[in-house]
Amino acid sequence: MLLAMAGVQAANPVVILPDGRKMEGTEVRVTREGVVYLTTQAGRMEYPKGTKVVMDQPADLVKAEGLVQKKQFAEAIPVLEKLAEGLRFLGWDMKARKLLAESYAGQGEWTKAVVAFEALMADFKDSQGDDAVRAGYLRSLAAAGNKDKVMPLLEGAIKGGTRGEAAQAQLIRGRTKLESGDVEAALYDFMRNARYFKEFKEEAAESAFRTAECLEKLNERDRASGYYLQVARDFPDSEFAVQAKAKTANP
């Protein structure tokens, strides 16, 4: 019977046996059932599911991470999809799957992102304590239109999460309310974020900009101008700075 295999080319894979002995190889592959196959100079060795494998970070994963950092999500996704499967049971799969979920979100593939984040948190309990994972999941849920599921989670993060979680959750809740047409409720979230979470530059910059947008919609143009000026002054490197400067430029 043929076994479904997953695996990647990886530098210096080492199998650590129960008695502490180490078996070095040139390549490692794992079946979907978790059976480990290590290629060595003496041939291919087989080890049972649960055998510990240690290896350097694969070059393809380093490359994919670089693509994600550059927001080249379309290029990163196919590489990460292969790595997420090929690195199963090999220690680097959690990172590959996190980057994949982030890439789906970055590409606007929200349903895929939700599924990826949920599977990641289910399979790797440590990822549940990762602020970036939780924020990405909430953002994806909201963007996918799953308001019934996301709103209670946002409320919980705002009331009981860390300051970072609260800042991210309140920003997402503000976006969700704005998209539904509730400008005044959105304004409250954005303004509160801009005022009380200034240490989180990314969230504070967007919150101040969205505050200005909401004030404009409510015909409070003088107050809106003050927030646009705040974005241009306090967050000059933000993606919102150019738009804010344009709003405050003299005609």
Image (cartoon, rainbow, N blue to C red):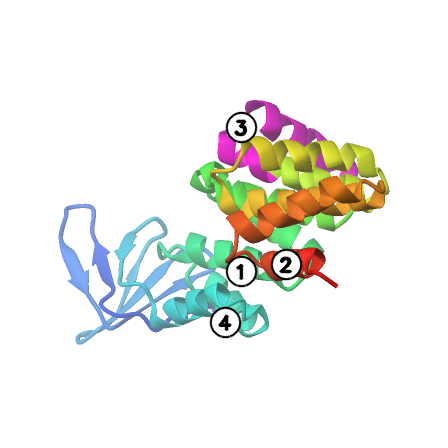
Closer to viewer: mark 3 or mark 2: 2
- Disc 4 packing (10 Å; few <14; some 14–19; many ≥20): some
Say which mark, if any, is on residue 100: 1
Say which mark, if any, is on residue 161: 3
| Secondary structure beneath label 4 | helix
For the point 68% across and 60% down, which residue is it?
Answer: 249
Chief SS of the magenta region: helix
- Residue 66 forms part of the magenta stretch: no
Closer to viewer: mark 1 or mark 2: 2
**How much space separates mark 2 and mark 4, taking CA atoms?**
38 Å
**Nearest to N terminus: mark 3 or mark 1:** 1
**How much space separates mark 3 and mark 1, taking CA atoms?**
25 Å
Residue 89: image location, x then y, percent? 39, 54
Q: Do we see residue 52 in this rendering?
A: yes
Name the quadrant of the C terminus.
Answer: bottom right
Q: Which residues are magenta?
A: 147-168
Residue 31: image location, x then y, percent? 43, 62
